Every structure is written in structure tokens, then in C-alpha cells.
Amino acid sequence: MLRGRSLSVTSLSGLPQWEVEELPVEDLLLFEVAWEVTNKVGGIYTVIQTKAKTTADEWGDNYFLIGPYFEHNMKTQVEQCEPLNDAVRRAVDTMNKHGCQVTDHADGKHVIAQFHEWQAGTGLILSRARKLPIATIFTTHATLLGRYLCAANIDFYNHLDKFNIDKEAGERQIYHRYCMERASVHCAHVFTTVSEITAIEAEHMLKRKPDVVTPNGLNVKKFSAVHEFQNLHAMYKARIQDFVRGHFYGHLDFDLEKTLFLFIAGRYEFSNKGADIFLEALSRLNFLLRMHKSDVTVVVFFIMPAKTNNFNVETLKGQAVRKQLWDIAHSVKEKFGKKLYDALLRGEIPDMDNILDRDDVTIMKRAIFSTQRQSLPPVTTHNMIDDSTDPILSTIRRIGLFNSRTDRVKVILHPEFLSSTSPLLPMDYEEFVRGCHLGVFPSYYEPWGYTPAECTVMGIPSVTTNLSGFGCFMQEHVADPTAYGIYIVDRRFRSLDDSCNQLTQFLYGFCKQSRRQRIIQRNRTERLSDLLDWRYLGRYYQHARYLTLSRAFPDKFHMEPTSPPTTEGFKYPRPSSVPPSPSGSQVSSPQSSDVEDEEEDERYNEEEEAERDRLNIKSPFSLGRVPRGKKKLHGEYKN
């Protein structure tokens, strides 16, 4: 069923309601074209997949996605059906008979086509070259040349206006792709990108300022009770603890109840994703924890797919040893329980010296002997193909984080995507994230940053940077991001060493929090999830559609002269229970992680803070109204 008012403009937990007249979707067709439609390569797949439901709710059967055909993706992600729209059915029949022949009519409906990234740009360029009556949008999620330049360790953001674009693209043998990307940008009626930082980049790399910034959202699942996501954290943390017990068998001389789990995940782009600065900060964190004789242990996971042969034998053995010990303990427990039960039935106190027989003692001694190992726990779970040149492993060797007993920071490289069917760490990515304490993503090049956004909606604090779209978005919307569990490292205006020190202080401050402080912080983090819901952020895509219709069909659609919406204009206030100085997030003296802050306990009230946040939010932008009887696209629709 078609809906005149999109779900993307409804109010979410006190967020401002966007006043806009009905969009005549019954007279329009919306197509989105991307290489990652049902084809997971990177973040664009997540954008399209998560946005599909709210867009389909608004557009009904007039919404279509076009992507590459891969048989394995078709079988698992697509439900085949016949097109309900006559024009689309005829187009499909024509393509089936004659190849990809384009039809230039749609039963009088106006067509909006949004193309994501340069791979889909050919369709946009040809549509404009053939003067097809289509309103076009081109969205870049990251500029092609920008990604290449940042990967080459160039001081990218301080030299944006100094690059010889054609020369740089040619030297990297991507000139043909760069030309397609730039042509798509300049042919489109409307050009959009995903963040303010990428808008600056695009203006220099592609020579056109984006018309609209369209931040990336997620489908946010809200729990009926606040404590439910905290229970999920405890449940999945226990499963990670089981893995750690096996991985560190024979060296498990640290308290798992005082162990924090940190992780970084994403494409294996060592510098772009900030793995380089993260490892250096971990080395400094390890020094601080050892110097202050902290009882906190930090286990850090690197979830970054790379080329491997198979699982590391020593890693598999560790999980087998853990399971064997569990089975032995369970068997002895049953024997012990039966003997205790029989003695109590006889009214006797059992003789503790005889409750375990010699066979039980022998079995336990053998089990203890099996946990002894001569080598250190491995720093990787797999056999790496390029072990000697792998950037992460090479850096680990340089900084000396080998998982020794004296190290307070332990590292584990897991060079493949997580899966619930894995014999090693049988957890889906979402389950793993919920079980961790902190996600760390100190990226140098991150046009948006879905990984910290996913942490936020699951109530897990995260580290990001002011060079990521997500980090900039949170700086605009949250008065004190650190209090809400969003640690933003300054990688734009500080030197690399200063940025590394700042990251180290964030990590060290997090390690000194008490359990209650972490629980309070997770509550605040989860409260930011409304900002990232497509039902709220979908308004920016809607604005882009209004704008392209007014430019492609000016005789039918008129848009009032207003500046495009921005993401600025409102902020979550500083929580009242947080001290009004930076000392609240960076403690200068050592402090045990199990020390409770009684003063904070008295100040903090979750429901009062949440209600205050809802009341303090102001509308980021508004649209003017038109007289009743006229249909409007941020202006008016003429018949």
C-alpha cells in the first residue's frame, strides 16, 4: 500500500517531527542502482539493506533496487516474483528478449533514479546523454581517489587544495574509473554524499559541492525494558570469556571478571582504518597499566579479513583443552553431588577426604598437566599466508605485544569474518559486538563509519575520529560525546603522536571505570540510537528526491528557494550527573576498576536523564507549509 507520509518523518522518542506535505508517490517510480544490492562488499550494502524497509513502506510497489546478478546471492537474499508495474514488466520482457534495451516511458509516471558510486554511474551518464526523462541522483560514499591517496600515507586533509587530480589518478592507474566517477557527479541533477567531511573531500576531488548530505542510518531495534540490552551484553560476554579461557590456557593468570574486551573490525586497510595508531596506543596503554600495577587486563580483537591457509593448530587445541576441562569438571561435579546427596540422606556430614576417589584425583592431575604449554598464546587465530609482511603482525613484533604473562594488554588477530558456525569463535558479528566493552575505530579515512554506529545502537561505547563521518555527526549532535560513550580522537588538527596519546588516554580512562560507571555509560550510549534510525535520517534522502524532481521536471515540480537541510541545529545536552570539566572522563591518578563512586550513584537517574535529553532537542531544519489543496515537494506540485 502506498503511503503519502513517510515513516522517516515520524517522531522518535522526542526527536523533532518533520512537517512536510504529502509526496505524490503514486505518480512516481523510484529506482536505486548499486553494485552492492544483495552483494556484500562494504558499507554500501548495509546502507541499502537497512534503508530498504522504510523506503518500501513509503513507496510501496513503486520502489525498485537494481544490482548485479550473482546466483549464490539470488538464492539467499532475493524472493523471485513477477513485476506488478506494467511499465517495469514490459521493460523486463524487452531485456529478456533483446538484451539490455532501455525503454523511455513508464505509463506517464515520473522516474527518480539514484545511482550509488562510480560502478553504477554508467547508467546515469547514458541516461543523460540519451536525454531520457529521468530525475537523477548520484551518491558517493567515498571518493575513489581519496581512498587511494589516504592508503598511500599522504597528508590528505591538509593538502586537499594542492593535489593535481588528473596526475594523481593517472599515476595510480585509476584514471578511467576516476573519469566515470567525475562524469557521474557532473551529469546528475543532484549530487549527494554521506557526511560533511566527505562533502569537503568531494568538492576538491570531484570539483562539485554536494547538494545534500545524507547521513547513513540503521534499523534500530528498541527494547521494551532498558535492562534488556544490558542482559544481552552479559550473556555474550560470557561466551567471549569461554573463548579466552581456551585461547590463553596455561597462561590464564588474570581475572576474567576484571578483563575488558576491546575490538576493531572492518576492511583490512591498515592505515585508513587506524589499526596503526591503535596498536601504538595499545603499547602505551600496556606500559601505563603495568606501571600503575593495575589489576585490569585488556584483551583486544582485530576482526579484519586477510588471506589465510586455515585455523592455527595451537588455537584449535586451546579450545579442545578448554572443552575437555569443562567435561572433566562436570563429570567430577556429578560424582561429588551424588555422594554428598547420599550422605545427607543418611544424616551424615560427608568425609571430605574420601568424597573424591583416587581415579578422580588422577583424572584431575592429568587435566592440569594438559593445560601446561611451552609457548605463549598465539597472537593470531589463523595461519597467515603473508605472515612476515603482514602489517598488523609486523607491528606486533615491533612493539613486543606477544601475550606474555606480564602484559596487561593481550592481542588476538582474527583474520576472517565472524560466524556462528565457526569451530573457534561461534558467534555472529552482532553477538560479538554486544559482548565486548568498547569498539575502537581510530580511522584516518572513514567517509561514514558503520562500525561505531552499530556499536551505538547496541549500547556499546566506541572510539571514532573527527575524520570520520560518524564522528563529525556526533560532535554536531552531542554536547559531551565522551559522557555518552563516544570518544572522538582528533586526527585532523593534531600530530600523529598527539592523536596517539589522546587515544591512549581515552583507553586508560576507560580501563579505570568501575563496573557501575560502565553500565551507566552503556545506558547513555544506547540512548543515542534514535539519532541513527532510518525513520529519522531518511528525511535527507527524501529531500534529495524533492530537489532532483524540481530540477529534472521544472514545469511540473517547483521547489521553494531554501538552503538544503544540514545535520546541524540540535544537541544532546551534557548529562547532569557528569562533572562540568574534562576530569570526569580522564582520571589522572590510578584507580581500581571495582571502586564505586558513591557521589555519582546519588546524582545519576537514568529515567530523568533520558527525559531531559528528549526535551532539549531542537529541530535541525523545518519546511514551510503550503495552502491546503496543493501537493507539495518542499514547494508545490503543479498539474
Image (cartoon, grey):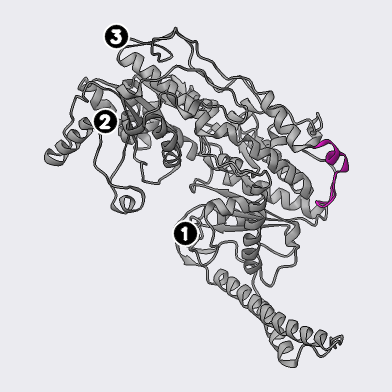
Tag 2: amino acid = Gly
- Which of the numbered marks, if any, corresponds to residue 386? 1
Q: Judge from the rendering whether residue 228 lies leftward or rightward of residue 587; answer left or right.
A: left
Please give the name of the residue rendered at 71% of the width and 84% of the height, measured from the top-left corner: 364
Tag 1: amino acid = Asp
Answer with the quarter of the image where residue 13 lies: top right
Image position of 26 with respect to 516: above or below:
above
Q: Is residue 323 visible?
A: yes
Please give the name of the residue rendered at 56% of the width and 27% of the height, measured from the top-left corner: 11
Answer with the quarter of the image where residue 460 lies: top right
Query: What's drawn in magenta, residue-wise?
Result: 590-604
Quadrant of image for the C terminus: top left
Q: State which mark lies toward you, 1 or 2.
A: 2
The residue that disc 2 covers is: 123
Q: Marks 1/2: CA distance?
A: 39 Å
Q: Earlier in the sequence, mark 2 or mark 3?
A: 2
Tag 3: amino acid = Asp
Quadrant of image for the N terminus: top left
Q: Position of residue 6 (x, y in %)?
A: 45, 27
Q: Judge from the rendering whether residue 412 lies leftward or rightward of residue 599; answer left or right.
A: left
Q: Is 162 or 92 nearer to us in this picture?
A: 92
Q: Is 309 or 287 nearer to us in this picture?
A: 309
The residue that disc 3 covers is: 555
